[in-house]
Amino acid sequence: MKLHVGACGIGYGHVGRDLPSVTELAREGWEVYFTTYGEAVNFARVSGYRVYEEPSVHYITKKGEVTMKGTILSFPRQLNSFFKQLVQEYKIIRKEKPDLILSDSRLSTLLAAKLARKRSVLLIHELKVLIPIRNPSFKKFSEEISYRFLSSFWSLADKVVISDFPPPLTIAEDNVKLWWPLRKKSKCVFAGPCGRRSYFKGDKGGVVYMRVSGLESERTILNDIYYKTGLLLAESGVSTVMSRGNVKDESASLFEGGKFVVYGWINSSENLNVKLLVSVAGQTSISEFIDLGIPFVLTPPRSHTEHWGIARSLSKKGIAVSLSLNSLTPESLKEVIQGALNNERLYEAASDFSNIVRTYPGDPILLAVLKGEAPHKLKA
């Protein structure tokens, strides 16, 4: 059995949430390879998979913020890259002859699968893209048009796995919207977030884990603020671990007598005994820790609408405290973290939420769908 995985290459999150499922399939004898772009290329490679690198499509950012003007001006170039992706995807599929296609939020992969007459599974949670436009009327109009347009194409997949919980538990509640083509019977399944780490538990006596992720421009700012915040926390006696989000570097440095440990990259978090996660509110980062029953301190920029929406959603559910990256300082972040650590209601809400959402395990459901969509003669 051969699986073609076309993963969105913006950041590490999409490849990251694919890895638990595809690694399990590889153990069972499936041949797996990735097609992706941008920073995700090296991430997939260091994870041990063959990778075809394709042209990038991406947001345009400035000082850690998504700039709408820059993104719009880059549209001709982005559209050209998309069509190059589509052509390359089709050629790769014809060359590799996979038995099944998994698209993680990539339209070019779905279209190429359709052209090549291959069965496909779509893994997605950002069905409705929120556009950072200030004019409310134009914003709503633009979002609705793009939402309906994209949904028509997403529905080309033979099966759609939504990497989130059903309402009212949904993490990315502003993004998970099903237009009528996706409401067809048996088309969609809510799996729960994929890429989770359900085999270890949170520990209130453990460490604060500050995890740098997101777009490259966001990571640059987060690295500086999180590092300075970690030093302040360690000085006040709070054991803190930080990951700089550099997939090529697994080295560690100790500060403040070992109270603050900084890694380039942490491949596995189960031995950290985490009591609080600090992150930019990427869905994959949240997914890895949602079962632990620990709260979150989230620091997304307002212009990154998906991350800001997730932070707002989790804050409404009472399991997170959210701060805008735009006005964040190490001192203000330290105060919020210490306040969260002493907030019993936050921990109670996080524990209650984790107990409910474990009924949507994510990866096992994606695995079952992939095996179910495999060609009949190869299913056994």
Image: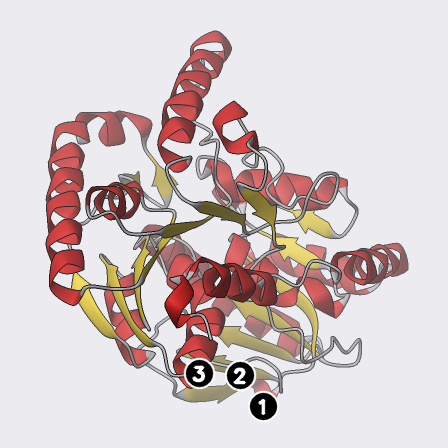
Foreground mark, 1 or 3, reads 3
Query: Which quarter shows the N terminus?
Result: bottom left
Q: Nearer the viewer, residue 326 or 182?
A: 182
Residue 312 position (above or below residue 144): below
Label 3: which residue? Answer: 28
Gap between marks 1 and 2, in whole Å? Answer: 6 Å
Classify mark 1: helix, strand or loop.
helix
53 left or right of 321 in image:
left
Residue depicted at x 38% and y 68%: 377
Q: Amino acid at mark 1?
A: Gly
Give the image location of residue 316, x and y in percent.
75, 39
Residue depicted at x 13% and y 38%: 83
Residue depicted at x 44% and y 35%: 303
Gap between marks 3 and 2, in whole Å? Answer: 36 Å
Give the image location of residue 273, x and y in percent.
69, 82
Could one spot residue 155 in this view of the protein? yes
Could one spot residue 224 in this view of the protein? no
- How are the residues colored? secondary structure
Classify mark 3: helix, strand or loop.
loop
Give the image location of residue 256, x and y in percent.
57, 85
Which labelled disc corresponds to residue 258? 1
Earlier residue among tags 1 and 3? 3
Dot 2 crowding, Cα within 10 Å, few <14, some 14–19, many 20+? many
Residue at the extreme top of the image, as rendered = 137
Q: Nearer the viewer, residue 1 or 351?
A: 1
Q: Nearer the viewer, residue 134 or 141?
A: 141
Dot 3 crowding, Cα within 10 Å, few <14, some 14–19, many 20+? few
- Mark 1 and mark 2 in contact? Answer it, CB < 8 Å: yes
